[in-house]
Image (tube, helix red, strand yellow):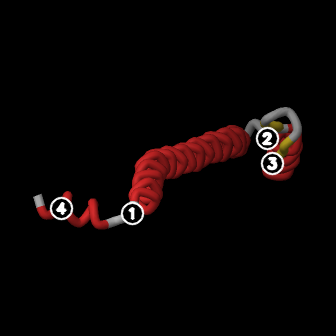
Amino acid sequence: MERFHTLRAISISKRLYLLGATITLLTLIPLFLFVANYQHNLMEQKRIKTRHLVETAHTLVDHYYRQVQQGTLSTEQAQQQAISSISNLRYEQKDYF
């Protein structure tokens, strides 16, 4: 009961400001949590995408390496073809390796 007495001692305008501040704070906390989680998810998706792109380029280089090991291509030919293939790789239509 003493809590209510201390609230009654505060003017109505201050109680309204306190109520408004409390509502604002309780509304903003979930918003900040949502934004932080959204940003984390975006960064994680970007990391995964980058890893997949690097794995694609690595697989391409590995293909030419195996051809050198099998004797199908010379080292110089495989290097030139790998460089040419990787330089032609694109992602998101405009970006390149």
Q: Position of residue 29 (x, y in %)?
A: 44, 51
* Quadrant containing the N terminus in the rendered view: bottom left
Label 4 crowding class (10 Å Cα cut-off): few <14, some 14-19, many 20+?
few
Per the rendering, the mark at residue 47 is none
Residue type, label 4: Arg
Label 2 crowding class (10 Å Cα cut-off): few <14, some 14-19, many 20+?
some
Q: Judge from the rendering whether residue 11 lies leftward or rightward of residue 84; answer left or right.
A: left
The mark lying in front, picked from 1 and 4, is 1
Residue type, label 1: Ser
Q: Are marks 2 and 1 in contact (CB under 8 Å)?
A: no
Name the residue beneath numbered marker 3. 97
The mark lying in front, picked from 2 and 1, is 1
Per the rendering, the mark at residue 73 is 2
Depth check, front residue: 84 or 42? 42
The mark lying in front, picked from 4 and 2, is 4
The first of marks 3 and 2 along the sequence is 2
Secondary structure category for the residue under label 3: loop
The first of marks 1 and 4 along the sequence is 4
Residue 8 figure quarter: bottom left
Q: Residue furthest left?
A: 1
Distance CA(mark 1)–CA(mark 3): 66 Å
Name the residue beneath numbered marker 1. 11
Per the rendering, the mark at residue 3 is 4
The first of marks 1 and 3 along the sequence is 1
Residue type, label 3: Phe
